[in-house]
Amino acid sequence: MIKLDNSYLNLPDDFYEKIQPEAVESPSLIAFNFSLAEEIGLNIDSYSQEDLAEIFSGNKIIENSQPLALVYAAYQFGHPVAQLGDGRAHLLGQSNGFDIQLKGSGRTSFSRNGDGKSALGPVLREYIVSEAMNRLGVPTTRALCAVKTGEEVYRQDGPEPGGVFTRVAESHIRVGSFQYFAFREEFESLELLLDFTIDRHYPSLRSLPLHEKAIEILKAITVKQSDLIAKWSSFGFVHGVMNTDNFSMAGITIDYGPCAFLEEFQFNKVFSSIDQRGRYSFFNQSPMAKWNILRLADCLLNFIDEDQEKAIARVEQEIIPMFAMFEEKRFKAFASKLGLTDYSEADNELVMDFLNYLEENSMDFSLGFYHLKDLFVGDFKNYKKTKSLEDFVIKWKQRTPDLESSKEINPLYIPRNHLVQKAIDGVYAGDHSFFHQLNEVLSSPFIEQEAKEEFSRPAQGTEVVEKTFCGT
Ligand code: AMP
Ligand code: MG
């Protein structure tokens, strides 16, 4: 029997709407992550596949579960939005402290003009990519279940099969959750949210006075997010929509809408069709994370000091200097990929030389790093042999790289866009085999697998995915 609690219910009812998922016609299970269920202590032994499809489509509500939709606000592409919220998601509760949330499970009072539903494509995409991220070692929400609803939803290209995704997360608290109450100047609720967040993610701050909690949580989030962005960067991950509603207080990757992995390397690569100015381009992810943390700081100023100027001065003195971590950790991550275990700032030049080489020669980001072991022994077959590469190799070897150390950082298999698309196309055509095969290959990203060349090969010709969509 599944048993869930729900700590959000301890918060006042202006934090959420209690609302049941909408029933769907004929749910069927496409994927269920049994090992994750075990990890988070979900006891599903007594359920059949049909039961699981019923539960994780929202048709059948587990006893004692009180589903709810959380409210939040955001800065979207730099502009404040006073109220958003789970417009197509229902939080069922928690198991071992992990939130379990259905996505695509129907309308709530935060749906605005949306239908509250999800097409199956984005469900499968999030399933594949979030589990791949976990296997790469990136903090992320996880995929518990993907269900086909048996209903159609209408999207820009016409009708598509509907789906419900079950997301597992350390929490669903976002910077946007703080902004909701800060925009409304509801400081009591804001303080409750701060304490709730500290209880769940930063318990060591519990006993501090309010003004210290506020400053310390900014420090803690700076540490977590700089670790996260360094990981994203080291795997060529472009999130695509780092608005503050998609910026987690737990420091995990959340919301796999228009995300994509780099193939041909470009510092300023953008995939998302709505990111027209490149705000969330690959290399702009660090500056944007800092910007988001400052938006959180805005919310907390009143707590830091009653005198606004003094509060701002504290942020300037104590938080902004910490932001250097973002660049430092990102360079360090790239240096580790080059096998440099004893990183120092002097290595930044070497890192930039290699990245510039990748960009100038339109090289595949992941394979460019993966094949460094060949380059080390003088084998250039996977590279365009240029003067700048030869110069790099000389300098690099002088630093005596240890490529054993970088094995677990330079994956051979990443969820390339065209592979994810092929998996979705397969399921749409009634064939689930490629979807499952892809998940299997991505579960061991660092080890070469037999007869799996297709999964490491970059997209060619018409396979190349130039633009991604939120898919909502
Ligand atoms: P996202 O772009 O997925 O982060 O979503 C931004 C906002 O739009 C959130 O408040 C979502 O709940 C809402 N939203 C996205 N898709 C839908 C949909 N199909 N129906 C209702 N609300 C949606
Ligand atoms: Mg979102």
Image (cartoon, rainbow, N blue to C red):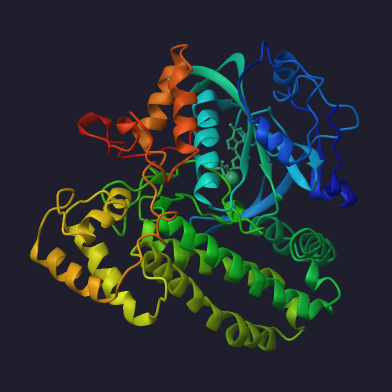
For this rendering, which residue is in front, 22 or 425? Answer: 425
**Quarter of image, ligand 1:** top right
Q: Is residue 37 above or below residue 262?
A: above
Picture quadrant of residue 300: bottom right
Image location (x, y in percent) of residue 370: 31, 51
The location of residue 2, given as percent across then percent down, is 83, 30
**Can residue 87 be seen in the rendering of this structure?**
no
Q: Is residue 92 left or right of residue 155?
A: right
Q: Is residue 151 left or right of residue 441?
A: right
Query: With 274 as the anchor, is 193 left or right in this view?
Result: right
In the rendered image, the quadrant that contains the N terminus is: top right
Q: Is residue 41 visible?
A: yes
How many discs mark residues in the rendered view?
A: 0
Vertical side of 323 occupied by 25: above or below? above
Question: How far across and down, in percent of the image, does residue 159 sit?
Answer: 48, 16
Dividing the picture into quadrants, the one containing residue 458 is top left
With respect to residue 226, does 435 lie above or below?
above
